[in-house]
């Protein structure tokens, strides 16, 4: 490349643009090849399932089919007996129809099914066989978050499907349809706080401190799009001051999210304070570009009937969830551990003893 071309910013930008276009087209080609392969596997699995071929030809069917395909289509991977079994599982898992899921393979969900790699599907099949709702959920989550196979496997081993979008809320009553659905999807019940270590008689302040100290893990548990705005967030209303436990902004719903923590069983009066904070944020922080603020109360436990009745009296969009926390230690456990200073003194004694010898 000549010195003139190297110094030409427009030329350099053009080269960078060509590189980006090439990579995008190559990715599209990879996606297209993957989609074609999955559709082939789908149709193969459909034939095996609907024609009942494995039962018709007996236990050696998959081995014989593997040999025959390898002979007719040499130098192509993917025709092992095990993989051929997965094509049947693949078709049967996503073609299931029940009262909760009227499914046709030509809809948007089908497009998503054919959009993730076959290796991801094998993990999903292993963990979700027989569950026609859980499997598409993890397909959608894989696409939305661009999960690798290892990340997908980690989430498959959790109860994310059972928890996501399960908070008791009044979002449908208080928010317009598109935002209410998105806001509901952001919730979980319960929230998993197992990454925290607390004494068994911890107070709300300790829970709040622990979450802030582990903010990265907390943001991961909250889900996509949450940005931390502050703890004990100061709100000045007229001549009075109020402090919100935790304030977030969510970029998916373009709205503030107020989170209040209660290290106790839910009581209806808890919603009054949360609703006030939601209203205050709407008046003091929310811009014309933002959607209405939502509130989430995370408590130790709740009676679902009481929670639903309490929400009927609230005019702000709020939800109620529990948290689960398994790593609890006796209150005096921490005091029984040596301090850093004590450890350093013991180490110094050991070093001196070694020198004397």
Image (cartoon, rainbow, N blue to C red):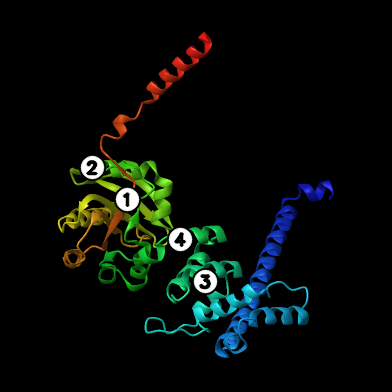
Name the residue carrying label 4.
Answer: 157
Q: Earlier in the sequence, mark 3 or mark 1?
A: 3
Distance (Cα) linking label 4 and label 3: 13 Å
User: Residue visible at 78% across and 76% down?
Assistant: 74
User: Are the two marked residues, 3 and 1, in contact with CB atoms closer than 8 angstroms?
Assistant: no
- The secondary structure type at the circle numbered 1 is loop
Q: Earlier in the sequence, mark 4 or mark 2?
A: 4
Name the residue carrying label 1.
Answer: 325
Name the residue carrying label 3.
Answer: 125
* Mark 4 residue crowding within 10 angstroms, few (<14) / some (14–19) / many (20+): few
User: Are the two marked residues, 4 and 2, in contact with CB atoms closer than 8 angstroms?
Assistant: no
- The secondary structure type at the circle numbered 4 is loop
Q: Looking at the image, which is closer to me, 28 or 203?
A: 203
Which picture quadrant has residue 249?
Answer: bottom left
Q: Earlier in the sequence, mark 2 or mark 3?
A: 3
Name the residue carrying label 2.
Answer: 201
Distance (Cα) linking label 3 and label 1: 30 Å
User: Residue visible at 43% across and 47% down?
Assistant: 216
User: Are the two marked residues, 4 and 3, in contact with CB atoms closer than 8 angstroms?
Assistant: no
């Amino acid at each position: 490349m000549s010195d003139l071309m190297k110094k030409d910013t427009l030329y350099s930008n053009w080269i960078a643009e060509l590189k980006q276009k090439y990579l995008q087209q190559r990715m599209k080609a990879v996606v297209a090849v993957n989609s074609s392969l999955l559709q082939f596997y789908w149709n193969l699995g459909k034939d095996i399932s609907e024609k009942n071929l494995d039962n018709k030809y007996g236990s050696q069917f998959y081995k014989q089919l593997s040999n025959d395909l390898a002979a007719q289509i040499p130098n192509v991977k993917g025709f092992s007996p095990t993989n051929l079994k997965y094509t049947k599982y693949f078709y049967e898992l996503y073609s299931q129809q029940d009262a909760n899921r009227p499914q046709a393979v030509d809809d948007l969900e089908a497009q998503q099914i054919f959009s993730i790699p076959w290796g991801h599907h094998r993990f999903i099949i292993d963990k979700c066989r027989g569950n026609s709702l859980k499997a598409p959920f993890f397909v959608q989550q894989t696409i939305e978050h661009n999960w690798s196979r290892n990340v997908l496997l980690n989430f498959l081993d959790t109860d994310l499907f059972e928890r996501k979008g399960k908070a008791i809320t009044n979002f449908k009553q208080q928010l317009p349809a598109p935002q209410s659905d998105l806001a509901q999807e952001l919730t979980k019940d319960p929230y998993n706080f197992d990454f925290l270590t607390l004494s068994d008689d911890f107070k709300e302040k300790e829970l709040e401190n622990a979450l802030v100290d582990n903010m990265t893990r907390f943001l991961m548990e909250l889900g996509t799009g949450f940005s931390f705005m502050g703890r004990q967030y100061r709100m000045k209303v007229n001549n009075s001051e109020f402090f919100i436990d935790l304030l977030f902004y969510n970029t998916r719903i373009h709205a503030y999210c107020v989170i209040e923590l209660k290290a106790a069983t839910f009581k209806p009066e808890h919603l009054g304070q949360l609703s006030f904070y939601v209203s205050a944020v709407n008046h003091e922080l929310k811009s014309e570009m933002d959607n209405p603020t939502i509130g989430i109360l995370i408590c130790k436990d709740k009676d679902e009937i009481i929670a639903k009745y309490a929400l009927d009296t609230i005019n702000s969009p709020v939800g109620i969830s529990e948290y689960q926390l398994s790593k609890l230690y006796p209150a005096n456990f921490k005091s029984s551990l040596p301090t850093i200073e004590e450890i350093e003194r013991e180490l110094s004694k050991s070093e001196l003893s070694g020198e004397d010898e």
